[in-house]
Image: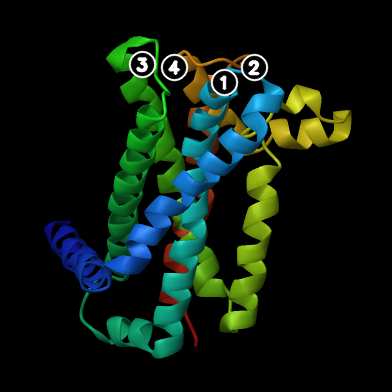
Amino acid sequence: MTAVLGETWVLARRELTHWRQQPFGVIVNWLFTVMIALMFGGLFGGAIGPDYFDYLMPGMFALSMFFGVEATMTAISTDAAKGVTDRFRSLPINSASVVLGRCLADLMNSAVGLAVLVGAAAALGWRWHEGLASAMAAFGLLLLLRFALLWVGIFLGLVVKGPESVTMVQILVWPVGFLSGVFVDPETMPAWLGTIAQWNPLSATAAASRELFGNPGLVPDHAILLAIAWPLVLTAIFLPLSVRRYRHLSR
């Protein structure tokens, strides 16, 4: 276990070194969700109501966790295409350390991106109203969702082949992100569409975050329980699939 943890940290530092040497892409990713929040808050806020920005931001926090799937998948696929993954597999290291190193680095990146988005929201007037402990619980749920989605991104990155497949998955990220309770209440959608949106894991985390932050919005029953259950289910499915896929990778 000590060896696995050491190898994981070394491989995570590899990613952090890349970001330090090429910071532009990382900074753009951090600012992208800020731009989306400004666009939707400014475009729809006046039409929907004065409380829309407070409703929007917990959803944007959840959406920023989901957008990380794309970056993780692309990085994993790029390493595999360039032969970096094959070089790692030839080394005397635990196969789990490679995917865990990516997971740790991307989780740290997402935590910083979330902090940037929260800072921007606070500067624009967003506040939480239920105390620091509830706010920390909400941030914990957001990072739990990101942790689960990391394994989805890692698995997809190991499965897809070629830039065409990567682009196809990247395009699908947007409908999944928007078909949720991030921007509007699913109750306002057509019945069949609202049902799909309510079962989206993003909707559960967004609703639970609104409840813990004390922000406006209808919160379904057991929202916090669902916000915990969905990431645990996704992790239980995709973590072993990712490790297994890496061990049997045949590129």
Q: Residue at x 49, y 86 (%)?
A: 250
Foreground: 201 or 119? 119
Residue carrying label 3: 134
Gap in angstroms between the C-alphas marked 2 and 1: 6 Å
Residue carrying label 1: 223
Foreground: 159 or 79? 79
Q: Is residue 241 positioned above or below 87 on the image?
A: above
Residue 129: where, in percent of width, then height?
A: 40, 11
Q: First in sequence: mark 1 or mark 4?
A: 4
Q: Residues within 10 Å of mark 1 (few under 14, many from 20)?
A: some
Are the residues flagged by discs 2 and 1 in contact, CB closer than 8 Å?
A: yes
Gap in angstroms between the C-alphas marked 2 and 3: 18 Å
Residue 235: where, in percent of width, then height?
A: 47, 47
- All told, the count of numbered labels is 4
Q: Left or right: where does residue 174 sit relative to residue 83?
A: right
Q: First in sequence: mark 4 or mark 2?
A: 4
Q: Quadrant of residue 117?
A: top left
Are the residues flagged by discs 3 and 4 in contact, CB closer than 8 Å?
A: yes
Gap in angstroms between the C-alphas marked 3 and 4: 5 Å
Q: Residue at x 41, y 32 (%)?
A: 121
Gap in angstroms between the C-alphas marked 4 and 2: 13 Å
Q: Left or right: where does residue 70 sit relative to residue 180?
A: left
Q: Quadrant of residue 111?
A: top left
Q: Residue at x 27, y 63 (%)?
A: 101
Q: Which label sits in the foreground, 4 or 2? A: 4
Q: Amino acid at mark 2?
A: Pro
* Label ID, residue 220: 2
Residue carrying label 4: 212
Q: Amino acid at mark 4?
A: Leu
Q: Residue at x 71, y 26 (%)?
A: 47
